[in-house]
Image: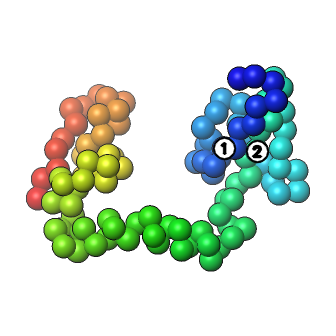
Amino acid sequence: MQPGSVLVDVSVDQGGCFETTHETTYEDPTYTVHGVVHYAVANMPGVVPKTATAALSNATLSYLISIAEHGIINALKIDEGFASGVNTHKGKPIDPGLADTMGVTPTLFAA
């Protein structure tokens, strides 16, 4: 990246997205590596809990409605984006990357 670029790592709580990421705090939120400014404050949504809760509710409501209307398996089968967020089902890996790491064949959703 060019010097002066800025990285905001919103998944620092889960280990971060960038090789150069390390967790920071609101008291000392940034640091620079190779001329690139990094911002990696843990639990960023925690500073605006009402807004964060409303945003999360808005982002997940459609999935809950789909589950209520179709059942979990059918909801996953009709929504590829929803299904892509599932790693395991009934104790077996569905995600190909996870299955490969475990040295097994990925399974399909079963009722």
Q: Is 86 above or below relative to 1? A: below
Q: Position of residue 30 (x, y in %)?
A: 83, 44
Single out the residue that lies furthest toward the left.
111
Viewer-closest of 14 and 104: 14
Q: Position of residue 38 (x, y in %)?
A: 77, 38
The residues tagged by marks 1 and 2 sit, at their Cα atoms, a distance apart of 6 Å
Q: Is 56 above or below relative to 110? A: below
> Are there few (<14), some (14-19), or many (20+) residues within 10 Å of tag 1?
many
- Give the left or right position of residue 32, taking residue 82 as reference: right
Single out the residue that lies furthest toward the right.
27
> Are there few (<14), some (14-19), or many (20+) residues within 10 Å of tag 2?
many
Residue at 54 percent across and 74 percent down: it is 54
Query: Is residue 17 something one can see in this rendering?
Result: yes
**Label 1 amino acid?**
Asp
Quarter of the image with the N terminus is: top right
- Give the label on residue 9, or none: 1
Residue 6 falls in image quadrant = top right
Q: Position of residue 104 (x, y in %)?
A: 24, 31
Residue at 15 percent across and 60 percent down: it is 74
- Give the left or right position of residue 97, taking residue 51 as reference: left
- Give the left or right position of residue 88, taking residue 74 as reference: right
- Give the label on residue 39, or none: 2
Residue 67 falls in image quadrant = bottom left
Residue at 64 percent across and 33 percent down: it is 18
Number of labels in the image equals 2
Residue at 72 percent across and 68 percent down: it is 47
**Label 2 amino acid?**
Tyr
Q: Position of residue 22 (x, y in %)?
A: 73, 40
| Circle 1: element type | loop
Q: Is 21 above or below relative to 92? A: above
Counting residues from the N terminus, which is met first, the one under dot 1 or under dot 2?
A: 1
